[in-house]
Each structure stands twice: as C-alpha cells, then as structure tokens.
Amino acid sequence: MTDIRKVAICGAGGTMGAGIAIVAARGGFETVCFDMSAEALARQRRAAGTFFGTSVEKGRMSAGDREATLARMSDTTDLADLAECDLVIEAIFEDLDIKKDLFGKLDRICKEGTIFASNTSTLSITEIAAGSGRADRVVGMHFCLPAQVMKLIEMSRGLNTSDETFRAAWAWTEACGQSPVETQDKPGFILNALLVPFNNDVIRAIEAGLASAEEIDLAIRSALGYRMGPCTLLDLIGLDTQLRLGEAFYPITLDPRAAVPPLCRRMVAAGRLGTKSGGGLLTGRLPEKAVEAPAYSLRSAGESRSFPAGDPFLAGARDGDAAEVTIHLGSGFAPDPAKTAVLVELDTECLGLHTGEDMGREGSNAVGFARYRNGDDPPSNLIELVRQPATDPAALAAARAVFDCAGFDVVTCADRPGRIVDRLVRPKYNDALRFLDDGLAAAEEIDRTCRMGLGYPDGPIERVTRGGLARHCEISNNIFKITGQTAFAPQRAPTIQKIRAKSE
Ligand SMILES: NC(=O)c1ccc[n+]([C@@H]2O[C@H](COP(=O)([O-])OP(=O)(O)OC[C@H]3O[C@@H](n4cnc5c(N)ncnc54)[C@H](O)[C@@H]3O)[C@@H](O)[C@H]2O)c1
C-alpha cells in the first residue's frame, strides 16, 4: 500500500527519466513529466505512445488502458507545476551542484510531505540531500537501464533519511510492480560497484593481449551462462559512458581497477564508442570452427577436472601412441616434438610451469588447456586453450580442431595466471565477499541484484559458495602471488565463516 498519488519525474526528456515516467504512469499514478527542454519532452511523449502501443500489440495492456495511461501523463517545463506532488524523482544530469540546486528549488515549491528521490548512479545521496532543506525526506532510487523494462531498483538511505521516507518510497516502487533491493549510500551501490571495475578489467585484458574481445565474450557466456558477454555490454553502454563512470568512481574509491584504462581513453578519442558510433571493442572476428579433427590419444597423470570418468570426450581417443595429438590429463607433461601438438591439462598453474620458463620461446608444439568448471559443478562447455609467444600455429590449430569437433566452445588466450575466466571473475567474487563484510547488502540482495539487473543466471555469492570458498581462495591466491594485484587477495576469513555458519 502506498499513500503516494501524484509523482513528478525531473529530467523526463532524458534516457532514464523517460523510462521512469513510463513506470510511474503504468503503475497507475498521475505523472508530471518535467524537463528544461520542451523538445526532449515532446520526443519522449511520442516514445511513450509507441512503447504503450507495442504493449497493446503484445497483449500486455488493452487499448483502453493505453489511452488511460497516457492521459495520466502531463508535460511541463515549469517547476511550479510540481507543487502538489507526493513524490519527485530526479533523473537529471549527473552533477552534484545541479542536483542540489534542483532539490533546493523544489523544497521551496513542493508541499512539506513531498519525498525527493534521486536516480544518481555515482553521487552520494547524503550530499545531494544536503541541498534539499529536507534531508530526512530524500532517498536513493536507482533504476536500471532501460527503466521501463528492468524491474530492479537499488534503494538507499542518506545519513538523515527517515525510516518513514524509506518505507514510503519502497512501497511506491512495489506498487509500480518493481523489485527494490536495499543497499547503502556508497559509490555505485551494488550493481555499478561490481560492474565498473569488472568492465575496466575486461578492457585491460584486451589491451594486455590476453585474448580478443570476441573470445572474452564467448568465454564468459559459455563458462558462466551470462546472457551477454562483457564486451557486447560495454559496446552497448558506450565506452564514453564507461570512461565517465571510471572518472567518477576512481577519485572516490581510489580503487586502481576503477581507474579508466588507457585503451578506453584511446577508443573514445578515436570516436570508437561502441554500438552508437558503429564500432567499439568487438571487431566481429572469431576463428572459424574446424570441421575435421586430428586423432588424439590420452595419457593420464591423475584425476582430470576437465573430463571426469565417463565423459564422452574420453571415448573419442585412439588407443596407443599413433595419434597426431597427445593429450595429457591431470597436469602431466612430456615433450614430444614428433607430434603435431602435445596438450597439457592445466589446473591453476601456467603452461610455463611444464614447458620451462624461457622468456616465452619455449614449448613450440605444447598447448595448455582447461575446461572451465566452478568447483564440483559439472564442467562447462568452455575449453580455454593456452598459447605461448612461440607456440607453433599448427599445434594451436590441431588443438582447436580436436575440441571444436567434439562440440566445445573454444577460446585461445595467452599464458597468464587465471586464463580468461578466472582472471576476470575472481576479483568480482572478492568484491562481492568484501561487500558482505562491509555490510553493503545481504548476500541474497547482492545475488538478486546481479540476476535481475545484469541477467546473470546466478549471483556471485551463490556461485562462489557453491564452487567452494576454499577453492576460490586457492585460485585467487595463486593469481595474487604471481601478479601481486590486490584485487586477487582472497577476502577475509570472517566472511567465509559467516557464510559457512549460515549454510550449516
Ligand atoms: N543512463 C544510464 O544508464 C543510467 C542508469 C541509471 C541511472 N542513471 C542516472 O540517471 C540520471 C540521468 O541520466 P540519463 O542518462 O538519463 O541522462 P540524459 O542526459 O539522457 O537525460 C537528462 C535529462 O535531464 C534534463 N535536465 C538536465 N538538467 C536539468 C534541470 N536542471 N532541470 C530539468 N531538466 C534537466 C535534460 O534536458 C535531459 O533531458 C543521472 O543521474 C544518471 O547517473 C543513468
């Protein structure tokens, strides 16, 4: 139940404001759309008509409801028209002074009980509220893009937000059919705090030559079941937006992963912003799948994480030593220059551990591989091939053909600790565990935010817990020891104990 009847959206001519206005009107609320640009308002009014028209075509609403919903929306460029609103949601430019100025003016215009909500992505709700003259009635209400489609809203309190205000704003989001999660007034709340550094890591991995954007996308989708690869998402968000987010986050958090990667700046300078400019990280080039594979034989030095007993891949091997490709399972290795390729199953170690570290000139026909697997979950369909600078292209092609023809998703990466997937997701798991320690949100809220806001099949806490926290610590620590990057320093033991205690 909500006592709120009349709602205003400031910045309703913009990307987010237009979507939020649709949510409010669709929820049955009288919706005042305010923007300083009448032209932007007119454009968004047409877009709302089209949106509701599609809803009618798809049977989500009747033609009568469409008319009634549009009739609940009014447009204005005069702030005085917001005087009688019960709730004002601002989605104007991301600038503290501009937002403070707006709330200051609104405080003089609106009735005493009006609640102010901010859709800011990076600014502090407490700081925005400081200019409002009614800090107890200001709340953070962060919608996801596109607001008219995504159900998740991150709700946060400023230091002075009253319980009554928070409850009323929360109830209103539920009355609109949205799904609120409670988080804190911290930069990026949950979603962007996880996403901005992760996306920067992806850009840095491309820049460092770990793998191509296409291979990173394929690896993440195949291993983790994400609906969209991170490079596709970055191209959609726009590298200019990612740059702005990094510039907003880094000075507040001083997290080196939040700092804008040099490649991101260069892409923006070159006008390669992503989908909107017709070109971004993705180049559209993935190696073609092989249709014919060389014969392979197996040597086992212990248990294989990639192919446990009974895996169909094992049945495809030739007996004896005549095959062109030898595959060592269980991390064993013996050089054999007579073969086209010698494949070494890797666990957490680099290929160089087996071939000998010789500044990358070693191991001409040796190719590392691992099938991605989260703890004892069944192995995924992803095979990460590991090459060294002087790996024979024929050996790499043979390795790829063996796994392509067996039906796997195959990517190739440089011989770096963590390969593609662990190198990119372990810092994210560490972030999520730290958020839990810091009390940013409950585990279920963090997971739900990722499932609903990013379309992940599961959240980071449930996945890392299911995969085993000890295993996470082992992998993360291994990468930390080699790279020295603190993002891989496994999160504190108390977190792990807290999760264990809860699950027992
Ligand atoms: N774009 C996203 O993915 C996203 C997601 C979540 C939150 N946000 C946040 O939402 C807010 C808006 O972002 P956007 O991407 O929709 O921006 P936008 O530039 O598309 O829209 C901003 C709108 O606000 C209007 N405006 C600016 N200052 C105004 C003022 N003083 N009075 C009245 N109208 C004013 C502009 O005319 C414009 O129509 C920002 O705080 C942003 O951080 C953005």
Image: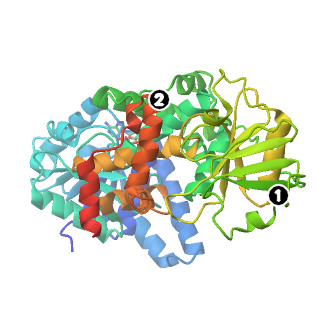
Check disc 2 and report the residue beneath it. Answer: 483
Horizontal and vertical percent for residue 283? 72, 37
User: In the picture, residue 271 is in which quadrant?
Assistant: top right
- Please tell me the numbered disc located at residue 405: 1
Question: What is the total number of numbered labels drawn onto the structure image?
Answer: 2
Classify residue 487 as left or right of residue 367: left
Classify residue 215 as left or right of residue 350: right
- The three-letter amino acid code for the residue at tag 2 is Thr
Horizontal and vertical percent for residue 306? 63, 57
Classify residue 3 as left or right of residue 360: left
Q: Are marks 2 and 1 in contact (CB under 8 Å)?
A: no
Q: Residue at the spot x=35%, y=36% of the render?
A: 94
Decide: is 330 above or below 27. above
Q: Is residue 196 visible?
A: no
Query: Quadrant location of ligand 1?
Result: top left
The C terminus, quarter of image: bottom left
User: In the picture, residue 202 is in which quadrant?
Assistant: top right
Q: Disc 2 to disc 1, how far (Cα)?
A: 35 Å
Camera-side residue: 25 or 377?
Answer: 377
Horizontal and vertical percent for residue 178? 35, 66
Camera-side residue: 155 or 395?
Answer: 395
Q: Residue at the spot x=52%, y=65% of the render?
A: 377
Q: Secondary structure at mark 2?
A: helix
Camera-side residue: 490 or 275?
Answer: 490
User: In the picture, residue 214 is in which quadrant?
Assistant: top right
Quick one: label 2 or label 1, which is nearer the N terminus?
1
Decide: is 239 above or below 461. above
Q: Secondary structure at mark 1?
A: helix
Residue count near mark 1 (Cα–Cα under 10 Å), binned few <14, some 14–19, many ≥20: some
Residue count near mark 2 (Cα–Cα under 10 Å), binned few <14, some 14–19, many ≥20: few
Residue at disc 2, CB closer than 8 Å to ligand 1: no
The N terminus, quarter of image: bottom left
